[in-house]
Amino acid sequence: MRDGGLVEAIKQLGWNINDEGDITKEQLADEIKREIAKDNSKYKYVFQNIEAIGVINKCLHDIVHRRSQLKDFVLTLGGDHGIASGSIHGLQKTYGENLKVIWVDAHGDATHPDDYQHYHGMPTGHLLGWLAKGEVKAFDWFTPMLKKENLVYIGLRDLDKIEKATLIDNNIKIFTPYDIELKGGIGNVMKETLDYLKCDNHHENPVMISWDIDACDPSFIQGTGTKARCGLSERESHFILKGTFNTGNLVGLDMVEVNPLLEPDPTKKRDVLFGDNKVLTGSPTVVYAMEFILSGLGSRWL
């Protein structure tokens, strides 16, 4: 996305950029080795690659907290959706338990750890405290703080049986594609979402959007690993982001699971139409992701 012109396009909107750079395993190799050396029996859950995931999330948490304390908007580019534990927790450390979260995804990312051994399938469950403090290796620094009434899902449509039951039993606010139609469209869904979270134009609660690109329909988003049918349209996606920005309460945005190597032709760039921002270039999924980010940062059609 940096190579595709994202930074220049953001500057066009009038933003100043403080690029904190990549967070890599190589940078954090010593910390990761120390986590690997710890006794696994101390922890209830030891997932695949969890030492690197935990250390990287801690580093992300620290950066997000430091920047948000300065009242900076924080944009995090993934990576898989497991990074949301670091970005959301960092914002929570700044804004407290009142932080609201709109999780846009095809998946709930709240799978039971006995059913799935990949952390990117359970960050919301971890944030909600369904994996308790001290249970997950390399996350000793992490204290679950997300209240279930401060979370809204949009776009969910691919859930396993236990995950589905858990979300229903906990009365989590969810808008599936069926609900979007039932409510009369994304405009009504966003009105209800922002009112429910009390972060609309009449309130001042901070809100974070954590966006998994597989929330979008695979008819136009193919560069991601866990596609599911009946996703959000391009127009619905822009509406969610523009509408939330317009409240004045948006303080952070994740854009994750963008993988151009999974495009049908990874070398093909998206066609440029007359109304496109000519600064942006790259594979279709990369350019769509950058355009969505710009909508979350105040890009307007009029």
Image: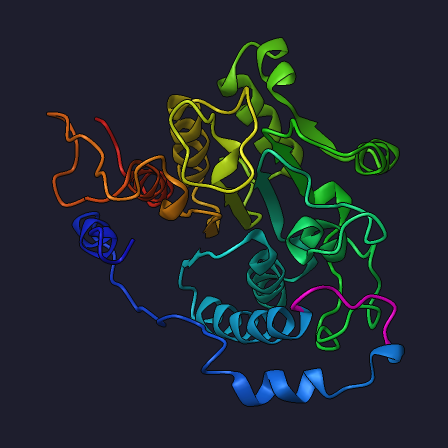
Residue 102 percent location from the top left of the image: 58, 41
Nearer to me, 260 or 175: 260
Residue 21 position (above or below residue 73) = below
State the extent of the magenta-drawn residues as a range: 43-49
Tell me what residue is drawn at x 88 percent, y 34 percent: 169
Tell me what residue is drawn at x 80 percent, y 36 percent: 167
Q: How many marks?
A: 0
Tell me what residue is drawn at x 65 percent, y 62 percent: 96
189 left or right, relative to 301: right
91 left or right, relative to 213: right
Q: Find out whether residue 244 is within the magenta segment.
A: no
Query: Mainly helix, strand or loop, the magenta region?
Result: loop
Nearer to me, 20 or 203: 20
Nearer to me, 102 or 122: 122
Residue 86 percent location from the top left of the image: 59, 65
Residue 15 position (above or below residue 181) = below
Question: Which quadrant would the C terminus be assigned to in this image?
Answer: top left
106 left or right, relative to 77: right
Tell me what residue is drawn at x 66 percent, y 89 percent: 34
Q: Image quarter for residue 3?
A: bottom left
Residue 277 percent location from the top left of the image: 16, 37
